[in-house]
Image (cartoon, rainbow, N blue to C red):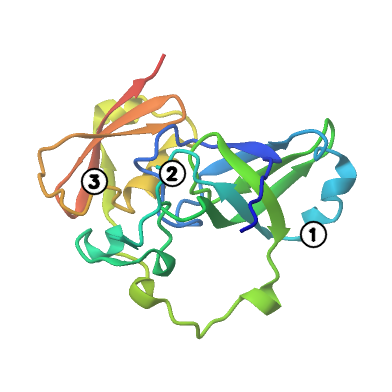
Amino acid sequence: MSSFTFQPIGYLATPFADKFGIPRQPGLAPNALGVLKLLPPYNRSEAVRGLEDFSHVWLTFVFHQSATDWKPTVRPPRLGGNTRIGVFASRSPFRPNPIGLSLVELIKVDTQSGATLTFKGIDLVDGTPILDIKPYIPYAESIPDARGGFADSPPPELKVVFTPDATARLIPGLRELIEDVLKQDPRPAYAHDADRIYGVRLYQFDVKWRCDGQTACVIALEKVV
């Protein structure tokens, strides 16, 4: 059998220092920005000429922090973490080849020095290797009556509140990002302890929060040094 070797065209900078807390699908956290500086020789301005005419792009990426062994069945969090389905019926990172696709909004193309692209709605960990970029074509790729299997509708969202101490430590734009992330309820499916404190790393902040099943309460923001 043939084998193939790929080289990243760049590494994506995102707010997500750890895998925990990353939205489970792209677009769910519109305030999560990602910046991709293309590496030589792919950083030539002509390589992205015309890309600014598209609102969304597909990113082909590597699950570089996942285990190398693939699994024939996986347990999607959306199904409560107990039901097993085939890996090819999921978006699990435990795949025969650890690659993924993410549909994100393109908000800026900068060719002043090389080529730098800025996206929103990112669902990838900081430092993710990007293998390719392709424009999203609405007339061919939007299928309104498609079936979504076990993910046929959006999951319920949590209400997000902040204690006065956490509010006092917010910087511009951070509240919106925290709300985007926590309202998706990133807790493991088996987590039901309302007193348990969780931590999510966003940019240089460690966000401490707890959840009673209906509301996520941010109790502290600690700057990581």
Given the image, on which type of amino acid does mark 3 rest?
Ala
Q: Which residue is mark 2?
A: 68
Foreground tag (2 vs 1): 2
In this view, the residue in front, 114 or 5, is: 5
Tell me where residue 213 appears, x and y as whole percent: 16, 53
Q: Which residue is mark 1?
A: 53
Per the image, the residue denoted by label 3 is: 216
Quarter that holds the C terminus: top left
Q: Is residue 45 left or right of residue 165?
A: right
Q: Is residue 156 above or below residue 109?
A: below
Compare marks 1 and 3 and give the one earlier in the sequence: 1
| N-terminal-most mark, 2 or 1 | 1
Q: Nearer the viewer, mark 1 or mark 3?
A: 1
The tag earlier along the polypeptide, 2 or 3, is 2
Question: Residue 44 in the image: x percent, y percent?
Answer: 86, 39
Which residue is pictured at 57% across the width and 80% down the height?
A: 143
Secondary element at image label 3: strand
Mark 3 nearby-residue class (10 Å; few <14, some 14–19, many ≥20):
many
Residue 28 position by quadrant: bottom left
Q: Position of residue 146 (x, y in %)?
A: 49, 82
Query: Relative to 51, is 190 on the left or the right?
Result: left
Category of crowding for the residue at label 2, using alpha-carbon neighbours closer than 10 angstroms: few (below 14), some (14–19), many (at least 20): some
For discs 2 and 3, the disc positioned in front in the rendered view = 2
